[in-house]
Image (spheres, rainbow, N blue to C red):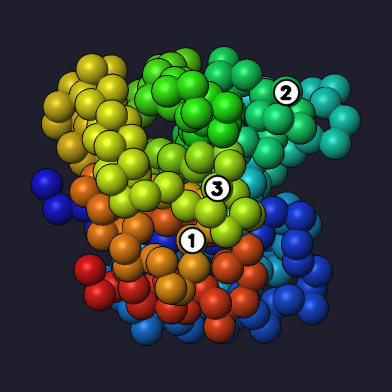
Amino acid sequence: MMRRKLVAGNWKMHGLKAALPEVAAIARAAAANPGVDVALCVPATLIASAAGVAGGMPVGGQDCHAAEQGAHTGCISAAMLAEAGAALTIVGHSERRADQGETDADVKGKAEAAHRHGLRAILCVGEMLDQRDAGQAEAVVTAQLAGSLPEGAAAEWLAIAYEPVWAIGTGRTPTAADVAAMHGAIRAKLGELLGAEAAAAMRVLYGGSVNGANAAALLGCADVDGALVGGASLTAEKFGPIVEAAAGL
Ligand code: 13P
């Protein structure tokens, strides 16, 4: 099964309109590497204007509510993201699981809402350091996956991102062997849940301190189909080399 690499940026709570030239520069880097899928997930306030300068590069949100609408102050629905020009959204990022107390069931509902509105979704899973140290990483991550996988999950609209919490923003990354082992465990679990064919088609991204220097090694691991990039996605200067590394694999 040939899976196209996907390199997605997650701008988190970074980005005012002054950053739009950077979005355009990242879109040019994406266009220069047509063998790789590139997407950029920006703050909701920036989606419409980013989509306006992104050319063919998909722009996404970073979260959506599971409900269609309602009394949920400060939240954003999948329909709102789509109307603003988003083509995808991240769901279940560990920062939201930790800061907003999102459960696996919440994340499942969010992914299903995204799909109802024609958005693709990147569903994040990942263990904490104490869980890895206790030898529980694979059990934790596969349980998260089982609990948060949406109904109708299919490679056409869903990708999984494995982001070990202790590797996010820290400059630390797992060894290539640990990445390959976890991605293999995720794909095996997908096989149990969705069947072998669907599991073989689904992209499983790695996220956590990916940069231009380590991207080729991380993305070259078995069962790694791309990257979800935080800090190094904020500028074309840093993000471009990651896209190029993916293109070279
Ligand atoms: P960093 O690339 O900054 O470690 O962030 C990873 C991440 O959380 C992407 O969603």
Amino acid bearing label 2: Gly
Pointer 2 with pointer 3, Cβ within 8 A: no
* Element carrying mark 2: loop
Q: Quadrant of the C terminus?
A: bottom left
Residue 145 pos. (x, y %): 42, 24
Q: Is mark 2 within 8 Å of ligand 1?
A: no
Among the two numbered marks 1 and 3 on one chain, the one whose residue lies closer to the N terminus: 3
* Residue 126 x %, y %: 50, 34
Which residue bears the numbered disc 3? 167
Disc 1 or disc 3, which is closer to the eye? Answer: 3
Dot placed on the residue nearer the N-terminal end, 2 or 1: 2
Residue type indicated by callout 1? Val
The disc at residue 101 is 2
**Which residue is depicted at the point 79% across and 78% down?**
18
Regarding mark 3 in the picture, which secondary structure is present there?
helix
Mark toward the viewer: 2 or 3: 3
Q: Is mark 3 within 8 Å of ligand 1?
A: yes
Horizontal and vertical percent position of residue 238 = 55, 77
Pick whichever, 62 or 93, lies toward us.
93
Q: Is residue 199 left or right of residue 135?
A: left
Q: What separation in Å lies between label 2 and label 1 (alpha carbons)?
A: 26 Å
Label placed on residue 210: 1
